[in-house]
Amino acid sequence: MKQIIIIGGGAAGFFCASNLDEKKYTITILEQNSDVLQKVKISGGGRCNVTHACFDPRELVQFYPRGNKELLSVFTKFQPGDTMEWFDQRNVKLKIENDNRTFPESNSSQTIINTFLNETQKKNVTVKTKCTVKEIEKQDEKYLVKTNSGDFEADYIVYTTGSSPKSLKMVENLGHKIVDLVPSLFTFNIKDDLLKDLPGTSFENAGISIPKLKTEESGPLLITHWGLSGPAVLKISAWEAISLAKLKYNFEIEVNFVSIDIDEAEEAFQSFRQNNPKKTIGQSKIFDITNRFWQKVLEISKVDLNKQVANISGKEMQKILENLCRKKFQVTGKSTFKDEFVTAGGVDLKEINFKNMSSKLLPNFYIAGEVLNIDAVTGGFNFQACWSEGWLIAQDLNSL
C-alpha cells in the first residue's frame, strides 16, 4: 500500500486524513506538539467557530484579504454548506448564531476534536505527536521525511504545518517561494484621554479609516485596556496587514463612533436642542452611545456637563461632533487578538494548483492550511479554507 505522510496535525491535516480512502493508503500524521488540533481547541473561546454560514462562493471569498481569487474554485467544490453536512452525517449538530458564525451545539471544541479523532481511528491513521520534522528529501519517486523520531518514507506528502517560520524554511529548501510573514488580525494600541477608564465600552457600528492608506471599514468596535478592538479593527488589520507592517504599526486612524456623517450629527444635535432646551448636556441622550462615553466626550471637548443644551455654543458643538465623528488617534503598536494568531504570508499561491492543492514544483506533494499565503478575517473563515483544501486533497488522492 502507498504511504501518505501528513505533516502537521491541525485542521487541514486532520480533515484531509478524515476523508482519505484507508483501503488505498497507509496514512500517518506527524505533529510536533504533544497535542493535535490545538488551534481548533482554543478557537471561538473554546467553542470552536467551525465555519461561517455563507453559502455563495462569490460572497464567501470577499472575507479573504489574501487568496480570494484562488479560493473561488475551491469553494465551488466544497463550501460551508458541505462542511455542515459533513458534520451532520457524523451526528455533530451545528448551530448558526445571529452573526452567521457557526458552532457545535455542545458549545465545546472538544466535540469537533473527538469527531476527527474518531474518524482517523476508524481509518487506522497513525498519529505521532512530539514528532518534529527536521528535513524532507526528495528521492526519485518518493520522499524521505527525517524527524526526531526516526525517518519516514512517503509516496505522497500533505504539508499542513501552519505558518511557523521553521516549516516555511523547510518548504523553501524544496524550491518553493515564500511571501514574508506578517501578523494579521490584531488590535490597535492607543493611549488617548478619550479611551482612558472606559475598557469594555462597545459601539454597535462604528467607522474606522486609515487616511494614509485611503482605506476604511465599519462594524462593531470595542474599547480595551490597550486601545481599540472589535470586528471593525480586526477587519482593517487583516486587509492592511502588509501595509501596516511596513508602517511598523505607527499610524493615524480616524474613528466615527456613531457611524453618521458630521452634518447629519449636527442636524440631530440641533433638533434635540430645539426640543429639549433646558436639559443639561451631560444628561442628554442625543446619540446611540453609553452615558459614560458621552460624558467623556464632553469632558475632552471641555464642555461643562451641567450646561443647558440651549447654551452650548456653536464652537462647543463643533468640538463635540469632531470628537464623535472624526476623532483622530495615534496607533503606536498592536496586540495579538486572543490566542487565535493568524498570519499573512506563506507559500506563494502562484506555485499551487488549486484544482487539487498540489504543488506545481514538487510531484505528489500537496500544501494546505495556514502555511499558504491565505488568510481571512475572524468568524470561521480560516477554518473553512482548511476544510475545503483538505477535502480537495483527499478527493484527488482517492481518485488516483
Image (cartoon, helix red, strand yellow):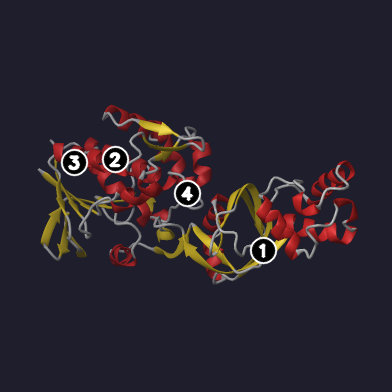
The label on residue 120 is 3
Q: Which residue is mark 1?
A: 194
Pick whichever, 7 or 258, lies toward us.
258
* Disc 2 from disc 1: Cα separation: 42 Å
- Kindly report the distance in space between the C-alpha atoms of the residues bearing marks 4 and 3: 28 Å
Residue at the disc numbered 2: 112
Q: Mark 2 or 4 closer to N-term? A: 2
207 relative position to 275: left or right: left
Would you say the residues marked 3 and 2 are in contact, meaning their CB atoms lie under 8 Å apart? no
* Residue 381, quarter of picture: top left
Q: Residues within 10 Å of mark 2 (few under 14, many from 20)?
A: many
Real-space CA distance between mark 4 and mark 1, rounded to the nearest whole angstrom = 27 Å
Q: Secondary structure at mark 4?
A: loop
Residue 359: tell me if it is visible: no
Q: Percent position (x, y) of residue 338? A: 43, 57
Instruction: Please report whichever mark, 3 or 2, sits nearer to the chain's N-terminal start.
Output: 2
Of tags 3 and 2, the one toward the viewer is 2
Question: Label 4: how many residues lie within 10 Å, few (<14), some (14-19) or many (20+)?
Answer: many
On screen, residue 251 versus residue 282, left or right, reads left
Is label 1 or label 3 in front?
A: 1
Q: Amino acid at mark 2?
A: Ile
Which residue is depicted at the point 28% across and 55% down? 362
> Which residue is rendered at x = 24% and y = 35% of the image?
399
Distance from the alpha carbon under mark 3 to that under mark 2: 13 Å
Disc 4 or 1, which lies upstream in sequence? 1
Q: Which residue is mark 4?
A: 378
Under mark 1, the amino acid is: Leu
